[in-house]
Amino acid sequence: MLNRNAEALFWIGRYIERAENHARLIDVHYHIQQEEDFQEEGHKWSRLIDTLGVRNEYLRQFESFSEQDVLSFITLDLGNTNSLFSCVHQARNNLRTLRQHLPSELWDIVNGFNLWLGEQSVADIMRGPHQFYQQVKERAAMFLGAEQSVMLRGNEWHFIESGRFLERAENTTRILQTVTVSCKSKDINSIYTQLQAVLKSVSGYQSFRRYYADDMSPECILEFLIVNPLFPRSIRFSFHKLEEHLAKLELDTTEKGSGHEKVIRQAGKIKAELDYMEKDEMSGDLALDVLESLMISCQRLGRTMDGAFFRREGVSV
Amino acid sequence: MSKLDPLPGLSPYPLQHFYDEMYADERNVRPHYKHVNRMFSGMSPEELQEKQKLMQRRMMEEGITFTLYNPAQDQPMERTIPFDMIPRIIPKGEWERLEAGIVQRITALNLFIHDIYHEQYIVKDGIVPRRMIISNCYFRPEMSGLRVPGGAYITTSGIDLIRHHDGEYYVLEDNLRTPSGFSYLFKGRSLMNQLFPELSFASSIRDVDHSLNRFLSVLRSLSPSRTKDPVIALLTPGEYNSAYYEHAFLAQQMGIHLVEGRDLVAQDHKIYLKMMNGLRRVDVLYRRLDDDFIDPLAFQPSSLLGVAGLMNAYRAGNIAIANAPGTGVADDKAMYVYVPDMIRYYLNEEPILGNVPTYLLSRPQERQYVLDHLSEMVVKETSLSGGYGMLIGSEATKEELIDFRLKILAEPERYIAQPIMSLSRAPVLSEGSMAPRHIDLRAFVLMGADRKPHVIPGGLTRVAMREGSLVVNSSQGGGVKDTWVMA
């Protein structure tokens, strides 16, 4: 496999995961109501933009927040590199350079996904937002399913999965950061709705209930989403998986000091920190620090991978 | 339900003075088209439209697309090529003659290129003027005196042929650099087999799949190393290139590496692939880039697409490049005029296939004649292809004619002119019924180190999809047909 192919695979994993996360977030935030939503025109839509962290990009194109502009920008706009369609489009273009390495079912699914999004209009989405985002989730699930059931467990597979879990860890961290920051300035009722929305967006509401019943305190939710060992969208779970896939990559050089070994060590370190985290680290400003340091770790790991696998120069013959 | 053609055999459109591939005259279908004609005539317009839609949909789903860049749009458009379902059929005897003519032509052209980069006998003997070589922008002095593997320069080529109203085939141009269209040929056939299994079962058509095996062994034969399993890579400009699908398709089918310039590195006059497990030496590079871009050290210094040091590795005999750099010297539209003479000179044979009469506008007499008859001429820029920079006199406006006249007078050596040939027509399906369209034929030739040209049976029939139009290039909205050679 070429270095460039490995990078393309890693990003396929990230893009598909990102598209799915976008769909989950938009769907949930679309359906929750906050008091301010009724007081201020456009509040609901600017909230959606903030959840995805794209306020600056949005304001470069638009002056005010309307349902149509916001949905179009975050869902269908190919000019916005972070829109849902852009993610799928990128994944599809990456897959296009790899068709000889992957089962053809994966191409059919991602290309079909891309074609389908190309046929959608904002009007279609507004007619039934929930159905639309549901379908996005289903198509992402189809990709995951086909990948699970037909792909050889070789380097190709481990690169896609590494991308997926790094993206998932980073995404969960980002959402929790946004919520934790905004919770500081709000009354308990609106915090409750927000946290509930986060749980719902990661489909974790039911699982959460099994652990904590009705104890909807911010600490519990943070604990659940950061360190729960069994919930597949928690940050700890993601890092366990990430380390596992990185360790299974078969390269010719795994001696000490190699980029590959460095990546495994970094992922393992974060994993260990999460394994030994205490509940009292989940409250107040401490939680903000934890999330901040997790975000930095995710980004640093991404850069280390870049240097270790994708941009190696002068490799030995 | 209304049938397409209530009286099978009667042509559904007037034939006018054109050669029609399916109809001998208005009452008779040519014998080799009988079966196909019967089948399409027996289908309802609704059924045909349904199949056509299915075909285009399948092409989108499989990603059989090319990319069109339009400055007016920020996103490049990915399009499927219009694929017409009525095959173009070439009878056995006719094909054998075409094949012989193409083999003869490519053999002579390959000898010519070798000669030009060595002794230049043909220039010394006064057949081809020296300035035609020196002033040719595709001439590569770097290739002079260089021995290429097996002496095969033109590994892949595409010869464009048309059929005039006299029923004869004429060569329109020779594409000797990196012709494209292979994927449409192979993919078109397999789509047809999926859509009309009954058709291909009932007719005995020459197989094309075998030519893909041949393609691979041709590339292998060029390998300078003695390993049994040489490493072969297809060098593509990348996913934004309009022919990217074809590059991916060929790499996949032949099981060779699909690489971009940044995946390659030169060390000690050898070229390596940057693999996850270290570097791997490349023996044969099938490049789908023009000469100018393959090596920034030797040619265009600003090119980011190629690999620095490739030409040095090539000169050192450590890698084969297909096609060899510098083959463009023979596919220039002005050099085309001399091909019949090359055949006589190198092979001592009369050309089997004729050229379209061509006027060199650098010759004063011919220039005057062309300027006097501009509205009956096709004028082409010698170094451009793909239907760009072309004037079709009969379709041009007054302003365009004046504009071209000035261009010709300013730089006569940049242009050639040909009388407007009446390209033959074949029926296409248009809204469920048959309508005539002009077509040509691109025949593909493969040549390995044994220098024996292999012509892929059939080739690619290109269709001018607009009624009456003569422009068949896909970049200008042309379509394609599956092309059958009867066994």
Image (cartoon, coloured by chain):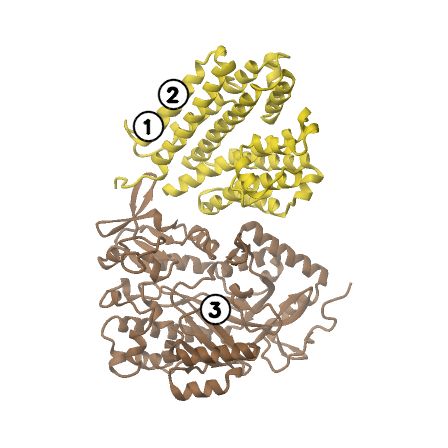
Chain colours: A yellow, B brown
Q: Quadrant of residue A74?
A: top right
Looking at the image, residue A147 sits to the left or right of residue A312; the answer is right
Q: Which of B215 and B342 is in front in this view?
A: B342
In this figure, which residue is indicated by the disc labeled 3?
B388
Residue kind at label 1, given as amino acid type: Glu
Amino acid residing under circle 3:
Tyr
Of pointers 1 and 2, the one earlier in the residue sequence? 1
Residue A261 shows which numbered tag?
1
Q: Position of residue B424 (x, y in %)?
A: 56, 76
Q: Is residue A79 above or below residue B359?
A: above
Front residue of A147 and A292: A292
User: Label 1's element?
Assistant: helix
Q: Position of residue A142 (x, y in %)?
A: 58, 36
B91 horizontally vs B36: left or right: left
Q: Is residue A303 at all visible to an observer of this figure?
A: yes
Q: Are marks 3 and 1 in contact (CB under 8 Å)?
A: no
Cα gap from disc 3 to disc 1, whole angstroms = 54 Å
Q: In this view, does B214 lie above or below A159?
A: below
The span from disc 3 to disc 2 (Cα, nearest Å) is: 60 Å
Residue beneath disc 2: A269
Callout 2: SS = helix
Q: Which of B326 and B340 is in front in this view?
A: B326
